[in-house]
Image (cartoon, rainbow, N blue to C red):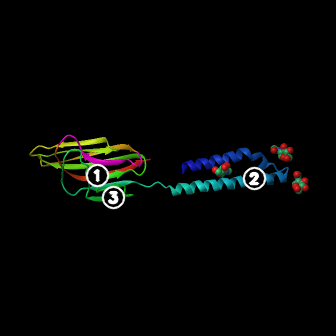
Amino acid sequence: MLNLILRLQLCCLILEGVYPMSIRNDTNPNNSIETLTNVVQRLEERLNNITHIIEKDKASERKAVFFFVRRSDYVTLNKYSIVTFSEAVINEGKHFNIYDGIFVAPVSGIYQFTWTTRTESSKTAGTELRVNNIQQAFSYMNIGSSAGYASATMITLCQVQEGHHVWIQTTSSFSENYFYVNSFTGMLIHY
Ligand SMILES: *[C@@H]1O[C@H](CO)[C@@H](O)[C@H](O)[C@H]1NC(C)=O
Ligand SMILES: *[C@@H]1O[C@H](CO)[C@@H](O)[C@H](O)[C@H]1NC(C)=O
Ligand SMILES: *[C@@H]1O[C@H](CO)[C@@H](O)[C@H](O)[C@H]1NC(C)=O
């Protein structure tokens, strides 16, 4: 929109720069009318062009992208296992598939991802966020026998390209990962 306003202003400046003498010179009325007609025609053309730009902009209107998914039970997973989910609380644009645990970025941009895992005493849990199969952030929990339970939250910002896949999986650290995923969220914060 700002771009459009700048263009409009630029257009007016150009027209003013080119035509001011002719428009204001009344010594030859024939000339003035001709010039005015020209200016009006150019303005009309310009207006049509701008209308076209606005309509195109509206058609490709940028949508918000965000999700919030979770799992309602503990899972036991070995190494390198992608976490799937039982519930999508919010799934704007439906870019997250809870059944395979994968978010597919609809547009390139900076995304924020967070996830919270919880585990219990005597258990281990290592999880990592992968973007296009590259680790972006990780969390390890190795809980003592009398600890009760503990939660860990990771927050990260990533550049994600359109069509790239994002997911949470267990790390290479523990052969047994026992945890609960309170939440996994993602949102597009900047194009
Ligand atoms: C106004 O128009 C007349 C006739 O076309 C021309 O001689 C004169 O130079 C013009 N004046 C200006 C200020 O453009
Ligand atoms: C304006 O146009 C009319 C008709 O074409 C012509 O007779 C007249 O001489 C023109 N005036 C000037 C100042 O050019
Ligand atoms: C309007 O758009 C056309 C096609 O892009 C261009 O050729 C023309 O110069 C534009 N007109 C104006 C007044 O900007």
Q: Which comes sooner in the sequence, label 2 or label 1?
A: 2
Residue, x 35% and y 58% (percent of image)? 91
Residue, x 82% and y 51% (percent of image)? 31
The secondary structure type at the circle numbered 1 is: strand
Q: Amino acid at mark 2?
A: Asn
Left/right placement of residue 173 relative to residue 15 reads left
Dot 3 corresponds to which residue?
90
Left/right placement of residue 13 relative to residue 4 reads right
Residue 3 x, y percent position in the rendering: 56, 48
Residue 153 x, y percent position in the rendering: 25, 46
Q: Which comes sooner in the sequence, label 3 or label 2?
A: 2
Q: Which comes sooner in the sequence, label 3 or label 1?
A: 3
Q: Amino acid at mark 3?
A: Ile
Image quarter for ligand 2 equals: bottom right
Please state which of residues 2 and 182 is positioned toward the viewer in this rendering.
182
The secondary structure type at the circle numbered 3 is: strand
Dot 1 corresponds to which residue?
184
Q: Amino acid at mark 1?
A: Phe
Dot 2 corresponds to which residue?
38
Residue 116 x, y percent position in the rendering: 25, 49
Mark 3 near mark 2, Cβ–Cβ under 8 Å? no
Residue, x 33% and y 48% (percent of image)? 166
| Badge number at residue 67 | none
Mark 2 near mark 1, Cβ–Cβ under 8 Å? no
Q: CA distance from mark 3 to mark 2?
A: 55 Å
Magenta residues, start to end? 161-174
